[in-house]
Each structure stands twice: as C-alpha cells, then as structure tokens.
Amino acid sequence: MGIVSIPGRARGRDDASVFSLPLLPPVIRRLLAAALLCAGVATTRPASAQPAAAPADTRLVLNADLGRDTISRHVYGQFAEHLGRDIYDGVWTKAKGTPWHLRDDVIQALRKLKVPNVRWPGGCFADYYHWRDGVGPAARRPKMVNTIWGNVVEDNSFGTHEYMELVRRLGTEPWIVGNVGTGAPREMAEWWEYVNHPGGSSITDQRAANGHPGPYNVRRWGVGNESWGCGGAMRPEYYADQYKRFAEFLRPFNDSTHAFRIATGPNVDNYTWTDVLMRDAGRMIDGLDMHYYTLVGSWEHKGSATQFGEREWFTAMQRALHIEELVTRHAAVMDKYDPAKRVALIVGEWGMWHDVEPGTNPGFLYQQNTLRDALVASATLDVFNRHADRVRGANIAQMVNVLQAMVLTRGPQMILTPTYHVFEMYTVHHDAVALPLTVQDAGRYEFNGQSVPAVSASASRDRRGVVHVTMSNLDPTRARTGVVELRGVNVTGATGRVLTAPAINSYNTFEQPNVVRPVAFDGARVADGRLTVVLPPRSIVVLELR
Ligand code: AHR
C-alpha cells in the first residue's frame, strides 16, 4: 500500500492574513489583527505597502518583570507511532540473533532533550490497535498487518509493557491514545484499568503475571485520533457524543489516577470542530488535540526534504508561521466556552512533511531533515512559548525515523538531526515563565513580492531566575541585528549558542553527522539596557542573560 491518503485535510495556506476573514465581526478582526501583528505573524499586505528598503534591524522589547504564564514542558512532547521505523529499528531493535530490546544509543540521545511525554501508539494506528494483542508472552502475541502504514506485518512485540519501559528509561510521562475508531468503550476502560488500577482484579492479576504488579499511573489519555479522518471520518457532533461515551469510563481509582482526557481536536483551521467539541463536550475535556503539518507543496507532491531552493525555504517559513493564526483563533473559540482556560490546546501533531527519501517505502514516511526543518521548529516553538496561556502541550511528528524526527538510524548507527538540536537548545524554556517579548519591528524577509517577519523570538525566566531568549533569523541570505530593549531586569552580559550551517539545505548524514550542530555564539552584547544580537543568516540562537 502507498501512503495513506487523508481525506478532507486542509492544506497549508499561502495567505496568513486575518484581514480576509469575513466570518468574524470587524471588531474581532481588528483585535485579532493587532494581536497577530504584535506577535510578529505574517500578514499579506501588498508588497507595495512595505517600505521600499525594509530596515535590517529588528526591534524588540523584553518586559522581564511581567511574566505570568508558565511554558508547559509538555509543548516539547514527542510522538512515537507504529509507523515505518519509528518503533521497530527506531527505539526497539533485534540486532543479529538477540531478542527484541530497547536501543540504548537512541535512549541516551533522547534523554538529553528532557522529553516531557511520548504520545503512543498513534496516530492513525491508534484507532486500529487492540491493546490485548500487545501484552503477554511475546511468542503468543498475534501478528497483524499494519494496513495503515506500509502493509507490513506487525508482530506486537512492542506493546504496553515495552512502551512503559521506554517511558521509564527516558524519564518521561506516558500519553496513551485509545482506540475509538475500531474499539469499544469497554476495551478502552479495561486498558485504563490494566495500567492504572492498584491490583486485585482479574485484569490487574494479568498485569502482574506479565511482570508488573504495581500500577503504571498513566494520566494523559487520548480518546481517539483524528476522528474527523483516519480515526473514523466522524462529524464533530457525532464525535462529541462518542467522546463523552468513551471518556465517561476513564474513572479515577485513587488520587493519582485522575485522567487528563484529550479529545481529538481540529484539523488545521476547522474552527467549527473546535466550537462543537467545546460546546457539546467541553466540560469533560482536559486537552483538545489540534493537528497541523507544514507542507511546502501539495499532499500529492510535497517536495524533497533536501533538494530545494529559496522558494521552498520561504514557503516553509510562511506556512510554519501560519500556526500562530491557528492557535490564536482556536483559542478565541475556546475562550467562548472556557474563559478560565481550563482546557489546554494541545498541538498533538506538527512538523514538516516532505516526500519520502527516494527508494524508501512510501508508507514509512522516512525523510531527511535539514537546517530548514530546524528553523521551522524554532519558529513554531516560539509561537507555543508565546501562547503559553492556552497551548499547554504539543508533540512533534515524530520521534525517530518518521517525518521531522529527532534521530535517524541505519542499522546500529544513529545520527542527530538539526531539529534534535533545536529541541535540545530550547530545553531552557521547559516549565519556565513566559516573558512578554514584543516585536516592535521584526524587519521583513521578502521573497518574490511576499514577506514574513525576518526574526522569530521568545523569552522565559526559569526557576533559578535566569532569563533565556531564543531568536531565529528566517532570512537565509542576510544577517539581522536584533536590538532588545531590556525592561525589568538588570543584565550585564549574555552568552549562548548558535545553530546554522553552510547552506539552506545542509543536513547530517551517517558519513558526516556533524554538519549541522550548535556552537558557541559570541554575537550578543549588552550595553545601556539593550541587548544587541547579530544573527547570522538562517540561524537559531539561544541566549542566557547574566
Ligand atoms: O504522523 C503521521 C500521521 O499523520 C498520523 O498517523 C496521523 O494522525 C496524521 O494524519
């Protein structure tokens, strides 16, 4: 089978303008436009409205004493699906003659990212997965055909216990996605009991017989995946009813097992989905799982991960930045029903989706990862940081060997991707207080009569009181000087690291694994209450202010 086609998925849009949103009342449109401009989101004013020679300097103001919301570490989450070589060969291997086991090299690398949670077993696979197939003696587990991803035989050697062992070794939290599409409330409720009940029932006796007498205490629980598409092609009204039916039976057994129930959220800009879910089921939802992928081409011809020019670079930046409009507008819909922001907006799948590497199984979604992917990641993570009040979870797709992965493997070899380095650099923001970093003038990166803000940025203060700033220069050819006015903080200097590379499509290979990696940065100076940062073209900088 070829790559799964996902009906009804909206494509990335060229136009990120809020000025063209006829369905919103004018006053809301104006407020939204002001908010997006303040945050530095792309707007598509005609090229003629831009200053003839846009200033290269980017001017920002950091109000270091006005932080309010914590950036949840969960926006740095990972996603591992039974898809291609994410699980098998990725985290789970059987080297010649050995039984299946977890890969130490991959685990050691991922531990450096302080991964907050791993979403599993899918994705589309989740609505096809029956958890009982993956417990008990491996030799007796049924083999199934993974008809969603590549028609390969799945031997179920990686199941609940193996996943929980991966979670333990990574020092992370589990996020299990239950099966709504081909499952039943009873099946989901029994999985919940299997992993969470303290013991004494027949189901937990089975857990003990399978090697784990005590409960695993899994809190994050997805009720289906993409139920508008591969999870069952449902209407929002129908899914809202199904959601309540399934979620009702995820009952707490004690204080440590209150479920954090995550509903299938909107596909890209389906605001009706958000509205209906929040209206009909909002009181039972803890997280709403929106999905948005950055594609440079169409779903049929996405384009090469490594062979591209500036046109594809610019389009990637433009479409990645579109996520700010999406989270802003979905959050506005959620505010209608949940002004206290109890329900988290979780971007449970995001990242760049390219054509697969030539010669690889089209159903495995194996793609290389260049400096362009890294810039898309940093700009997206800055958006999440700036929307910390509502965006309290996100999972890049996916963790190993699939889509915009952290790590690629070949036999016993492993390389770190440019995106891995971004996630490592951004660990400074985990659970830190988001600081307002207002872009007064981002400068524009122009291409072919269109433009996006040249610089993306976010800032936070960690538990020790240390302020970190991340800044990315999306312009592939021109250095930018960012001047940050520092308010509410006494700073004498800044140190940091920079990630860049010789070309827009530079990437790491098994032969040359360190083409793209962070190095020490000496382009930041502090004087007279101002931080001046000279950002090389196509670069990402993380700074610690002292
Ligand atoms: O990440 C690949 C697939 O994309 C997931 O399985 C699905 O949820 C989405 O459509």
Image (tube, rainbow, N blue to C red):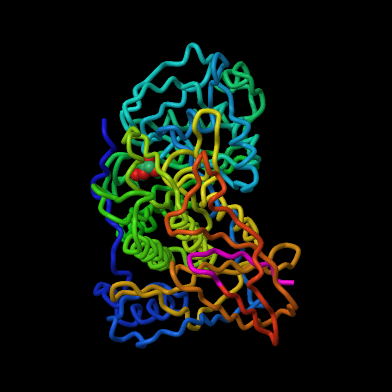
Residue at image position (52%, 54%) is 393
Is 170 situated left or right of 264 in this image?
Answer: right
Is 191 situated left or right of 63 in this image?
Answer: left
Q: Quadrant of the C terminus?
A: bottom right
Is 449 situated left or right of 529 in this image?
Answer: left
Asked if residue 102 shows in the view, the reply is yes
For this rendering, which residue is in front, 308 or 208? 308
The image shows residue 3 at horizontal and vertical percentages of 29, 37
The image shows residue 165 at horizontal and vertical percentages of 61, 30
Q: Quadrant of the N terminus?
A: top left
The image shows residue 475 at horizontal and vertical percentages of 44, 70
Residue at image position (59%, 33%) is 166
Q: Quadrant of ligand 1?
A: top left
Give the residues in magenta: 535-546
Asked if residue 245 shows in the view, the reply is no
When asked about the image quadrant of residue 543, the answer is bottom right
The image shows residue 14 at horizontal and vertical percentages of 28, 66
For this rendering, which residue is in front, 461 or 70? 461
Does residue 543 belong to the magenta stretch? yes
Residue at image position (32%, 30%) is 150
Quick check: 434 above or below 265?
A: below
Residue at image position (58%, 66%) is 470
The secondary structure making up most of the magenta span is: strand
Does residue 345 belong to the magenta stretch? no
When asked about the image quadrant of residue 402, the answer is top left
Q: Total number of numbered labels? A: 0
Quick check: 11 above or below 39?
A: above
